[in-house]
Image (cartoon, rainbow, N blue to C red):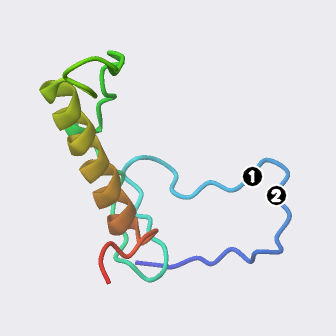
Amino acid sequence: MSTHTIPATTPHQTGVTLGENAAALVSLHGATAVIQRASAAQAAVPTTPSTATTPYGYSQAQADAIVTLLNEIRAALVEKGIIKGAA
């Protein structure tokens, strides 16, 4: 596996792309390079509005979907080395 470093001062008129495609291995901060995650847990949460009447908040299904999505986002950020995940 080769590692390429892009200097922070390199001017790019069109931006910087990390990974040529979803199968390219990418990581940050010394984490193990991995491919792009793909999972049903990444699906958008239905946009049913929350309620201000009893019961307050979201339906159980919507709350569960929010937790599932948040956990998937956290796992992706940890896997890429963007956040540590735990102290």
Residue type of the residue flagged with mark 1: Gly
Task: Please indicate whether residue 28 sits to the left or right of residue 37 in the image.
Answer: right
Residue at point 26%, 26% (across, down):
56
Q: Is residue 69 above or below residue 80?
A: above
In what element is the residue under mark 2? loop
Image quarter hosting the C terminus: bottom left
Residue 71 vs residue 25, the one in the foreground: 71
Mark 2 neighbour density, 10 Å: few (under 14) some (14–19) many (20 or more) = few
Mark 1 in CB contact with mark 2 (< 8 angstroms): yes
Q: Is residue 43 above or below residue 41?
A: above
Task: Please indicate whether residue 5 sits to the left or right of residue 48 in the image.
Answer: right
Q: Give the percent coordinates (x, y) of residue 68.
A: 21, 43
Q: Give the percent coordinates (x, y) of residue 76.
A: 34, 57
In what element is the residue under mark 1? loop
Name the residue tied to disc 1. 15
Q: Quarter of the image holding residue 53?
A: top left
Task: Please indicate whether residue 2 sits to the left or right of residue 23 in the image.
Answer: right
Name the residue tied to disc 2. 12
Residue 42 vs residue 13, the one in the foreground: 42
Residue type of the residue flagged with mark 2: His
Residue at point 32%, 15% (across, down):
48
Q: Which mark is residue 72?
A: none
Residue 14 vs residue 39, the one in the foreground: 39
